[in-house]
């Protein structure tokens, strides 16, 4: 949980919404250009996810995750020195994408899925609570740093979290289960961890249904999260209110993860995920316009966060249930690609819509439809395999 909280998955997405306005005022860059940084980061990281996942399968989660966490912290803190040029801005984000993906659930979820079987959904939810924890804490740290020393100080201030919290805890106590500690449900008759290879998974329709669903939902959510502070500002509320709404988004993520993970262990997961993903469609409607009261904007933020909590559980849980654990890191990494690419492209499109129309309404309308379609696709996945899948 601490590794996820302090990794490359939540920290950039919780800092950028708060520095976007100050950067726009200082450099004069439009919102699409500023958002392009996280797009570059997300696309590069997503494309490398299968490589990092495969490395975790081969060498273990511990070395891959902890080394990536250290490199990510150093690179993120170095954003203090970003030059006043878009080329430099993009280059910093590119480096972050190259080294940071190993500190995300792409690696950590493999260890959790090897430790747990019957209560895997809840265990993954607790691990993924790290992003909720980050969303609660990071905006407050970043806002305080901005107030004390400008937007640049937000980056090294937040980078202290992986250096001083996650790395020491991980070095002292994190490990994967030994062979005899793995749940019996994950192994074959010879005691080996069972599962499909990535190639075998890709030959089945379920992989592509999951990929399409993940892409649509990530595309709908990613930009809304990055631009949340600006959405709140368009309704006439100050930066402090925006930070508070971001905190409520975090509570939505937390609630979604715990409830959805608990239900995944007891019910067919797609039947749980579909109605949960209808809620953010309502959130998009609440966030439209410029005169909605703060209470309803806050409700919209909560429901939008609920979607993120659901989607992250969907990827980790269904990858293990439908494809097994032998090659989980590579399969999960491949399914993380559309999540990362969708979440990365989405902010720049939200920014383009804002720059050209003065509001986010058109993009929020599209996002509402994507939440519904992405959730409905999961209903086509069918029953879970009755025994561990066997790969080559």
Image (spheres, rainbow, N blue to C red):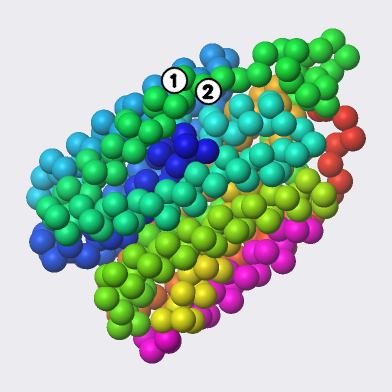
The quarter of the picture where residue 166 lies is top left
Q: Magenta stretch: dominant SS?
A: helix
Magenta extent: 271-293
Residue 208 seen in this snapshot: no
Query: Is 322 above or below relative to 217?
Result: above
Q: Residue at x 54, y 57 (%)?
A: 253
Residue 88 lies, in percent from the top left, at: 16, 43
The question of residue 291 being in magenta is answered with yes
The residue that label 2 is drawn on is: 174
What quarter of the picture does the C terminus occupy? top right
Q: Indicate left or right for 374 with 50 as reference.
A: right
- Kindly check if marks 1 and 2 are in contact, taking CB atoms under 8 A apart as contact: yes
Q: Quick check: can you spot residue 121?
A: yes
Where residue 79 sits in the image (x, y, percent)? 20, 42
**Quarter of the figure with residue 25:** bottom left
Image side of residue 78 versus residue 378, left or right: left
Q: In the image, what residue occupies the spot 26% across and 31% down?
A: 74
**Count of all numbered marks drawn on residues in the image:** 2
Image height of 388 relative to 335, above or below:
above
Instruction: Classify mark 2: residues with Cα within 10 Å, few (<14), some (14-19) or many (20+).
Output: some
> Which residue does the image show at 42% across and 62% down from the upper left?
247
> Which mark identifies residue 380?
none
Pinpoint residue 136: horizontal percent, then vertical percent. 42, 55
Tag shown at residue 171: 1
Apparent side of residue 105 relative to residue 156 in the rendered image (left or right):
right
Looking at the rendered structure, the secondary structure element under dot 1 is helix
**Which quarter of the figure has residue 326?**
top right
Mark 1–mark 2 Cα distance, whole angstroms, equals: 6 Å
Q: Is residue 236 magenta?
A: no
Specify whether 349 is left or right of 182. Answer: left
Depth check: give the residue in front, 132 or 318. 132
As drawn, 95 above or below 33: above
């Amino acid at each position: 949980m601490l590794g996820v909280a302090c990794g490359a998955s939540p920290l950039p997405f919780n800092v950028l919404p708060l520095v976007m306005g100050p950067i726009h005022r200082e450099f004069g860059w439009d919102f699409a250009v500023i958002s392009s940084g996280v797009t570059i980061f997300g696309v590069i990281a997503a494309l490398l996810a299968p490589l990092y996942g495969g490395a975790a399968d081969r060498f273990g989660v511990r070395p891959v995750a902890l080394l990536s966490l250290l490199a990510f912290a150093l690179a993120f803190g170095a954003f203090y020195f970003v030059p006043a040029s878009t080329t430099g801005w993009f280059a910093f984000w590119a480096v972050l994408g190259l080294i940071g993906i190993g500190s995300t659930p792409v690696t950590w979820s493999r260890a959790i899925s090897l430790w747990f079987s019957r209560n895997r959904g809840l265990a993954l939810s607790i691990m993924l609570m790290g992003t909720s924890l980050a969303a609660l804490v990071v905006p407050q740290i970043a806002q305080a740093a901005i107030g004390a020393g400008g937007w640049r100080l937000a980056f090294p201030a937040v980078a202290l979290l992986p250096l001083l919290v996650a790395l020491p805890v991980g070095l002292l106590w994190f490990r994967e289960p030994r062979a005899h500690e793995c749940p019996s449900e994950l192994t074959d008759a010879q005691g080996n961890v069972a599962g499909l290879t990535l190639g075998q998974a890709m030959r089945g329709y379920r992989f592509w249904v999951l990929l399409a669903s993940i892409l649509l939902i990530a595309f709908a959510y990613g930009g809304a999260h990055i631009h949340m502070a600006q959405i709140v500002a368009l309704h006439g509320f100050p930066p402090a209110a925006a930070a508070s709404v971001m905190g409520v988004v975090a509570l939505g993520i937390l609630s979604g993860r715990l409830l959805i993970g608990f239900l995944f262990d007891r019910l067919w997961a797609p039947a749980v995920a579909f109605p949960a993903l209808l809620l953010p469609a309502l959130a998009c409607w609440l966030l439209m316009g410029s005169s909605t009261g703060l209470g309803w904007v806050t409700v919209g933020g909560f429901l939008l966060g609920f979607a993120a909590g659901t989607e992250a559980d969907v990827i980790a849980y269904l990858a293990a249930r439908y494809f097994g654990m032998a090659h989980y890191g590579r399969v999960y990494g491949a399914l993380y690609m559309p999540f990362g690419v969708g979440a990365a492209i989405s902010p720049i499109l939200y920014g383009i819509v804002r720059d050209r129309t003065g509001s986010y309404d058109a993009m929020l309308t599209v996002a509402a439809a994507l939440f519904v379609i992405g959730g409905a696709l999961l209903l086509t996945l069918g029953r879970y395999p009755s025994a561990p899948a066997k790969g080559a």
